[in-house]
Amino acid sequence: MQINIIGAGLAGSEAALQFADAGWQVMLYEMRPHKMTPAHETGEFAELVCSNSFKSLLPSTASGLLKAEMELLGCKLLPLAQECAVPAGNALAIDRSAFAELVTQTISEHTNIHIMREEVFELPDDLTLVTTGPLTSDKLVQALLPHLGEQQLYFFDAIAPIVAADSLDYNVVYRKTRYDKGEADYLNCPFTKDEYYRFVEALNAAEKHEAHEFENEFFHNTKFNFYENCTPVEELARRGKDTLSFGVMRPVGLEKPSGERPFAVLQLRTENSNWSAYNLVGCQTMLRYPEQKRIFQLIPGLENAEFLRYGSIHRNTYLNAPETLNENLSLKDKPHIFFGGQITGVEGYTESIFGGLLAYHIIAGGLKSLPETTISGQLWRHLITPVKNFQPMNANFGILPPLEKNIREKQKKKLAYTERSLATMRQHVAKQK
């Protein structure tokens, strides 16, 4: 058997390894580095662009539960991510360069995978899986448009700056994980009340990129529709002067070494295994570069920060999957063309990998469904259930059906969801063998 896979991001890389290990011949197409996207920096496979975190590993979280379900389904990329992990408390954060290089090497050395470094301009006539993700090229979008009618959708996404570790003021920043859970893997920048409001005022007055700079021939009527989990920090600040201090910069559980609780705290997460670079957590931005340097250097401890990468904004494209795709995630008018990953309307790194894993099981294994009590099953249902306003979805407990027994304590309730989900997934996997 042979399959074309277009796009070697997280979903495409996962699917390529799955099919290849199952004995399929895989033609893997990737246009980078010959043609770059607005957000990628290399031609490596599975390059992460927005942050280096796959979120929590805890089974009491939706992200942790999804990872556990994917492990039962035989995920290929998460074990590789573990090999490239960097300290991040209970989260799976990685050295993104090491991860992309490892995935690229693993795929390149597989005898059943044939790599084609070229852009795809039109849909092939044979079995194909499209995993081009939210940064699908304009030419491929143009090829897709006749099959989507008026259902083409998109939103805007922003990424956070990265600063050099040796440029931080360690007399100000301190190492601590919230509530001292796990290792103290995060650096914390503590704000006084005056420092915090000065920072917010600067964000509100800052010069940002405007929508017309991101329009092109296919997206003339661009509006800034942000995915909520990636809303730029300056947009959050405009919602109210205390929005950040009650959100991503909340100080609870992040007391200073003296025991004093700051008015607000910005956390920094390590970017690589040698601790030489840090990501500004929650500071995805669409500010112009000079403004980023001026404003982010108002953060205590970052007064002399060296910026290794500035934040940026890019268009994320996704389909109205329930309207344009069959239940097996193939195009309604071209059933030999399948889709997987973020382009289908899942959101997040782990969810993107799941999209490639799901596509493999559907195409190669004839998978018809997944248990409705699992995050995996409900994410798939999200992609095939028509709704008035379809939006990208990530793993969350809210998409699961209620428990048979009402549990009031939040932590016990989440663990009950997890136990039920994993039990039904184990039964499902056992039946498939």
Image: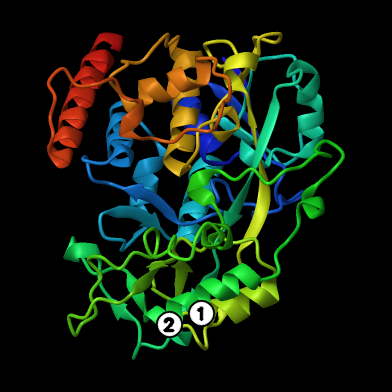
Residue 245 at x, y = what percent?
39, 65
Q: Is residue 337 above or below residue 302?
A: above
**Mark 2 sits on what residue?**
194
Q: Amino acid at mark 2?
A: Asp
Of residues 21 and 144, which is closer to you in this image? 144
Residue 9 can be seen in this image: yes
Q: Secondary structure at mark 1?
A: helix
Report the disc number at residue 198.
1
Q: Residue at x 55, y 34 (%)?
A: 342
Q: Residue at x 52, y 12 (%)?
A: 328
Q: Determine the image quadrant of residue 154.
A: top right
Residue 105 can be seen in this image: no
Is residue 410 left or right of 74 when viewed as pictured?
A: left
Residue 204 at x, y = what percent?
60, 68
Of residues 352 and 153, which is closer to you in this image? 153
Residue 365 at x, y = what percent?
43, 12
Of residues 219 and 376, which is closer to you in this image? 219
Is residue 149 left or right of 316 when viewed as pictured?
A: right
Of residues 262 and 99, which is closer to you in this image? 262
**Colouring method of the image:** rainbow
Contact flag, marks 1 and 2 (Cβ < 8 Å): yes
Q: Secondary structure at mark 2?
A: helix
Q: Dividing the image into 4 quarters, which one contains the C terminus? A: top left
Q: Is residue 174 above or below residue 73?
A: below
Q: Residues within 10 Å of mark 2 (few under 14, many from 20)?
A: few
Residue 3 at x, y = what percent?
61, 21
Query: Marks 1/2: CA distance?
Result: 6 Å
Q: Dividing the image into 4 quarters, which one contains the N terminus? A: top right
Q: Residues within 10 Å of mark 1 (few under 14, many from 20)?
A: some
Report the disc number at residue 330.
none
